[in-house]
Image (cartoon, rainbow, N blue to C red):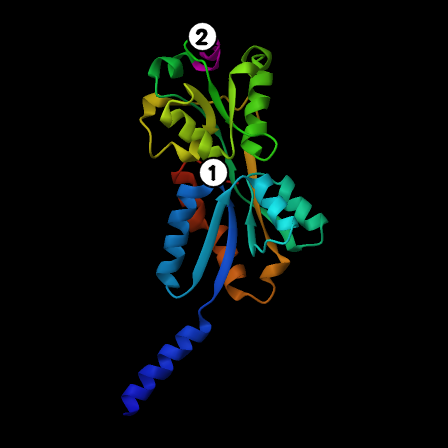
Amino acid sequence: MKKILFVALLSLTTFVHAETIKVFAASSTKLAMTDIVGAYKKAHPTDEILITFSATGKAYAQFSNGFEYDLFMAADTTYPAKIVADGMALGAPKVYANGVIALYSSDAQVVQKGLEGLVDSNVKHISIANPKVAPYGVAALSILEAAKLKTSLESKLVLGDNIAQSVQFVDSGAAEAGLVAFSLIKSTKPATHYVLVDTALYTPLAQAYVLTKHAKGKKLASDFAAFVGSDASKKIFETYGFLAP
């Protein structure tokens, strides 16, 4: 009887200490964050981490309109800074990774020609993320501007709601090429289907997270944020093509 009671009390204690948090993470982090959450839950199996992947600007708009994220993991530093300016942050933002952009196409010849090949008539559509809501879209436009290709290619651009959809456009054939997050294709696509864009044409995206006021008093939120910034997580981010902060 005592043994049964002890097991019951132990189970109850485990249940009481289990927590749930809501995390927004930029679409560029989806593959890496899936592994990071998995690694965290190996040590904390009862905790629940609910992640929404989306465009950073869209998530910020939702957050500003009352949606409760405990941890906000952006694709830039601008939106976390806005959360701080709004008085909705616990502490300062922290850069967790630097994102880089690749030219991606299912046609290896397009990849071999690089950015200049995008002007070819066989490339009718070029996929980028919507720059109004996605930092990777802003970076893609800056690349085309720096390469003096923006004017000639503007009519070919098709905009994904987020950077993951921009990859899907190329996968489905809706676009012959795309300027996308390297982190979404490095481990899933043949090396002949992509080439990294020269960082002389743009600045890699410093991606930062910030704990929001909704995380106040939630140990899981602060613990998980610390894990995202840990050396173990940095290695996972680097595995998927991010640069170390």
Which residue occupies 58% across, 15% down? 150
Residue 201 visible, this orientation = no
Give the answer, above or below, for where 7 lies relative to 94: below
* Mark 1 residue element: helix
> Which residue is labeled 2 in the image?
120
Q: Determine crowd level at label 1: few under 14, some 14-19, many 20+ residues with C-alpha closer than 10 A.
A: many
Q: Main secondary structure of the magenta part?
A: helix
Please provide percent x and percent y for residue 98. 52, 37
Comparing 59 with 31, the one in front is: 59
Q: Determine crowd level at label 2: few under 14, some 14-19, many 20+ residues with C-alpha closer than 10 A.
A: few
Please provide percent x and percent y for residue 220. 50, 63
Please provide percent x and percent y for residue 120. 45, 8
Are the two marked residues, 1 and 2, in contact with CB atoms closer than 8 angstroms?
A: no
Residue sticking out furthest to the bottom:
1
Q: Which residues are the magenta region?
A: 114-120
> Which residue is labeled 1 in the image?
28
Kind of residue at disc 2: Asp
Residue 18 visible, this orientation = yes
Magenta residue check for 119 = yes
Please provide percent x and percent y for residue 27. 48, 40
Comparing 11 with 99, the one in front is: 11
Kind of residue at disc 1: Ser
Number of labelled discs?
2
Comparing 91 with 138, the one in front is: 138
